[in-house]
Image (cartoon, rainbow, N blue to C red):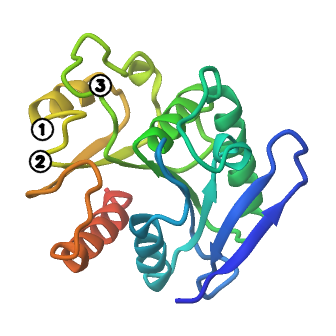
Amino acid sequence: MDSEEYKDDSINDAPVRGFLHRARGADADGLVLTHGAGANCQTPLLKALAEAFCSAGVTVLRCDLPFRQARPHGPPMRGSGERDRAGLRAAVSALQRETTGRIFLGGHSYGGRQASMLAATTPGLVERLLLLSYPLHPPKRLDQMRTAHFPSLQTPAMFVSGERDGFGTKAEMESALKLIPAKTELLMVAGAGHELMTARNRAELLESVVKTFLDFGKG
C-alpha cells in the first residue's frame, strides 16, 4: 500500500520524521515502528511490515529516531538513548492525532529496546509492544544483559527473534521474559538471524508476525 512522507515539528526537541501508512477508518489502531542502530526507517523489514499491518487495518508510522535524524550514518552516540525515547514519545503523540484507535509501539533491535525502556517508565503510554530482534546482549557478551528495566515493564510485549540471532538464543530470551510482569509472547523465526527477513521467508514472516501480534491482544 502507498505511504506518505510524514513530518511533525510540534515538539521542538523531538521532531518526528518518517512515513505514514494510513489504513481505512479514522478509528483504526495505530503502530509506531522504528529501526535498529545501524539502519533507518527505510529498511526492507520495516517497509514490508508497515505495508502488511496497514493491509490488516492498522495505521503505521515508521519513523527515524532522533540519532538518525542527526546523523545519516553510523550508530547512536553514547547518551543518545534519552533523546531517542523522547522521539518515540513524540511519535506516539503524532500518531494519536492521526487515528482514534489503540496505539502500539515497536521497533527492530535498538529501536525496540528504546521502545521497551520508554514503556517501562511510562505505563499506559501504549497498549502493547512489538519488539523485533530484541538485543538481549551483545554477541558473545552474556555479562552485558539488557534487562534491567524488564521488572518494571507493565505493557504487554510480543518479541520476535530469529533462531540464529547472536544477540540472544531462544533459551536466553525465554529466561529473560520471565522477568517481565506483563503478558509476553515469544515468536521464534526458523533459520533467521538478527535481520529476521529474507527473500525466502518474507511472505511467511509477515503473515506470522501480523497475525500473532493482532491475536496477542485478544487474550
Q: Where is residue 5 in the image (x, y as percent from the top left)?
A: 72, 75
Where 88 sits versus 94, above or below?
A: above
The C terminus appears in which quarter of the rendering?
bottom left
Q: Mark 1 points at which residue?
A: 170
1 and 2 marks in contact (CB < 8 Å) = yes
The residue located at (63%, 42%) in the rendering is 125
Q: Which of marks 3 and 2 is nearer the N terminus?
A: 3
The residue located at (30%, 29%) in the rendering is 136
Where 79 sits versus 159, above or below?
A: above
Gap between marks 3 and 2, in whole Å?
15 Å
Q: Where is residue 79 in the image (x, y as percent from the top left)?
A: 64, 20
Q: Where is residue 122 in the image (x, y as percent from the top left)?
A: 62, 31
Q: Which amino acid does label 2 sit on?
A: Glu
Q: Name the residue under label 2.
A: 163
Q: Which of marks 1 and 2 is nearer the N terminus?
A: 2
Describe residue 169's horizontal placement relative to residue 86 as left or right.
left
Q: What residue type is labelled 3?
A: His
Q: Nearer the viewer, residue 123 or 209?
A: 209
Q: Which amino acid does label 1 sit on?
A: Lys
Say which mark, if any, is on residue 137. Answer: 3
Describe residue 115's horizontal placement relative to residue 182 as left or right.
right
Q: What element carries label 3?
A: loop
Nearer to us of marks 1 and 2 is: 2
